[in-house]
Amino acid sequence: MMKVLDGVVMELQDLALPLLGDVIPTADPAVAFKDVAAAFLVGAMPRKEGMERKDLLAANVEIFKVQGEALDKYARKDVKVLVVGNPANTNALICSHYAPSIPRENFTAMTRLDQNRAQAALAARLNVKVDKVKNVIIWGNHSSTQYPDAAHATVALPSGVKPVLAAVNDEKWLNTSFVETIQKRGAAVIAARKMSSAMSAAKAAGDHMRDWWMGTNSGEWVSMGVLSDGSYGIPKDIVFSFPVVVQNKQYKIVQGLPINDFARSKLTATANELEEERTEANNVLHKK
Ligand code: LMR
């Protein structure tokens, strides 16, 4: 892929970004991960038609083992790691397993793309610009079991700030079409483009890392796949998407949001899937 990488280098130069100091194209983890402070792990083996999940995890254990070990050896100990490649949540877990000298909390998975999708869908429904919608939550896995939750979201209308629930005034739509559209959006993009999302995923990765680095706006939270500490009754030791706020480069899971029965069933389903993925990943790890 080194020839392909040359094209990426050209594009990076042509972006004329004032903050871009240097580009080092390499296939050597020792070079790539040297003193890294923010790592975007984009490459993974996504599931293809007919592929069993265990085949997928076996391939990803190999990929994330190399990257985890390289982070452990060469990166800064406070490196912030964002896993984009699927299955992103479990890949983040595997990666942290191979980087024991780096705090496990520093390994996160991207659900910002789902958050952006949910925000855009609500803005379209309410006929407002996307930045008028705040505090949508993505719970759980970056997969079709995720739960996009508008129950705590607000929208700034010309008449004032309102709960999205009241502004949409259609709970059935919020609990069915809205949820399903966001859950299946990645697959819909693949079906249309014959390739997975690129621009929107890159934007979301930038959003995730910027907010982790610079902090979240007051009164706002964002969704990140982070190591579960048992908040909201979610099992510990899975990488689960929660609403978080960030200050001084540290994220904190937002506590105390009410979870109704409908939301609880969705949280349980996506947590169950992540526990299954963890079991399969552990099976692969123990066979090695
Ligand atoms: C997306 O959400 O667009 C991607 O994660 C889809 C995929 O499977 O690559």
Image (cartoon, rainbow, N blue to C red):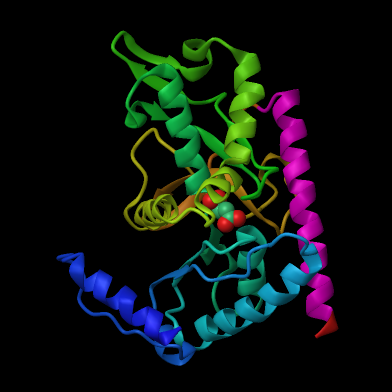
* Chain part drawn in magenta: 259-286
Q: Would you say residue 135 is visible in this rendering? A: no
Residue 257, image x, y percentages: 59, 30
Q: Residue at x 61, y 76 (%)?
A: 64
In the figure, is residue 8 to the left or right of 103? left
Along the horizontal axis of the image, is 46 left or right of 71?
right
Q: Is residue 156 above or below residue 81?
A: above
**Residue located at (51% from left, 88% from top):** 73
Which x, y percent locates residue 188? 57, 43
Which residue is nearer to you in this view: 130 or 199? 199
Residue 150 seen anywhere in this rendered image of the structure: yes
Displayed quadrant of residue 281: bottom right
Within the image, what quadrant is residue 57 found in?
Answer: bottom right
| Along the line of sight, the residue nearer the viewer: 258 or 7 | 7
Closer to us: 112 or 187:
187
Magenta: main secondary structure equals helix
* Residue at the (47%, 52%) spot, across then down: 251
User: 258 above or below 81?
Assistant: above
